[in-house]
Amino acid sequence: MGLKSNSSNDSGVKAMLKSNVQAAFKRFPNLHDARDGVIRDGTEEAAAEGREVKPVDATEEAPEKLSKRERTAVFVDGNVLMMSVPEAVGEIDPFSNIIYNYVREAMRTGHLVVVAFDEPQFLTQAKKEEQQRRDASRQARTVTSSEDMVPIPLSHNFTRAQVEALPDVHVLKADRKCRVRLYDEIIRRVYERCVNVMQQWQANGHSPGVLILDGVEIRGADRPVDEPRVVTMVGSDEDALAKFQRATPIGEGDIKLIALENRLRELVSTDPAYEHYRLAITSTTDTDSFMTMLIDVAKRRVNPYAGALHSLFCMRELPTKRDRECNPEAKATFLGCDVALLEANIQRHLWSVKGTPTSEEHMLAAMLAFCSAAAICGCDFTLEGQKGARFDHFWESLPNFVATEPQALMRFNSALAREETIAHDACQGLYRVCVQASNHMATKPRYKRQAESVNTVPDSMLRRAVWSASYWSQNEFPATPEWGFLPQWQ
């Protein structure tokens, strides 16, 4: 899911960011340690405000001082959680145990935990197109035989007893309707266990925190077959739940995650009950979150919030083959990314030829150009991207574009406009980015053909890429042919 990667030459977005902005990344064994790596006895607030940082001895802290957990919120991608369960774990109880342990770790890390799920009925048509292609590709790769041709073992309206008797619930994930009901049933079990634990914490004199599920049918497999799926937001605290309710549905989880962080920023700035939050951890493996969070940092520079809230993007990664060879007991870890630090260093790179950013609006335009270039190189909405386009070449050429084409650069801010005709204007800026990249590629040996392909990028690809940047900016347009999408994918 997310941005196109290229493991053969490390030219993908994530690999390039890790290589060129190493200071923004750090690996942690778990979310709890990631939190402690950012919140250090209140010194992060002083640093954020430009004051001298004086380390505090934890043994001398005032007893009324809030704990690190009470100052932290954790936003978790529920779909990524479900997909991370190993195929070897087939029965629903062990499957649910793994999800419970993930959520339990998030609750140990933050006082506020929100687990967000996709809402298929509200997914953009562009995402549905990508899902159809992915499903078709997966089916084409499956070698079938008479033994393999086994139908889905349960109907879309399976009961709790039926799924409990199933030896391998992973087979239900092949059908999207079965998958949704399976996820509902699993998260229902997890939620009930978590609420019980929170009640025990409270009985023992500890703060229970708040757990919210965003985009679930809490009845799970108990939902009657003749009743439609009712997607809601449920939570352990009614007041907190009311604060995070939204009037407009959001279909995709990664957009929910940045919307949830924005909502917390609003509350930190306006509601005394939330002003103590200092850290928001977003946990997902969807690399689209790089784009949503980077654009959000640039937007906040133009229109800042009153309160301060640090962002940490945490990606759970399995140990590599080399890791396992060195240590057979190697476990998954979290790659943490300080989003504000990453954005600042990307801006430093983008303006390295120009010298000094002209304004906050120009820096926002530069970040939109950066993200649009990433989309041109491949993402869920541009698929494989423009033929011959490699992100490392765009990374190398973008500073020259920023320095030499100020008018084209400012066209990118049109992507934030609500009117489609105005937003289309950003395509002209992206075309000039492609021309700069093409000219740069032409200076390299063996890239003449690729350079010509990038230079002649079709308008439909430019529009898809700009649509992607707008979408990552939380400015979604219908995925119509006017944006380069097919009327109906077949």
Image (cartoon, helix red, strand yellow):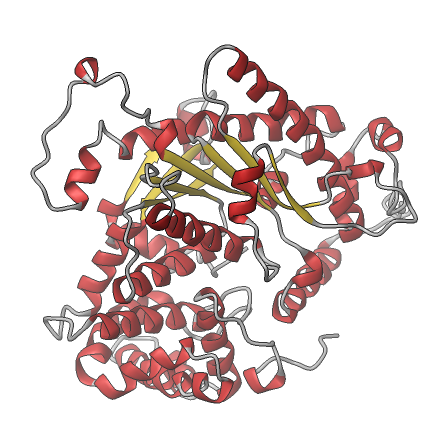
Residue found at x 32% / y 36%: 276
**x%, y% of residue 120?**
69, 57
Quick one: quadrant of the N terminus? bottom right
User: Foreground residue, 110 or 173?
Assistant: 110
Q: How many marks?
A: 0
Quick one: quadrant of the C terminus? bottom right
Q: Residue furthest left?
A: 52
User: Foreground residue, 450 or 365?
Assistant: 365
**x%, y% of residue 333?**
42, 32
**x%, y% of residue 311?**
34, 46
Q: Is residue 449 visible?
A: no
Q: Is residue 247 visible?
A: yes
Residue found at x 41% / y 73%: 389
Query: Relative to 420, is 220 above or below?
Result: above
- Give the quadrant of residue 171: top right
Query: Relative to 113, is 303 above or below?
Result: below
User: Foreground residue, 440 or 344?
Assistant: 344
**x%, y% of residue 350?**
22, 68
Residue found at x 82% / y 37%: 221
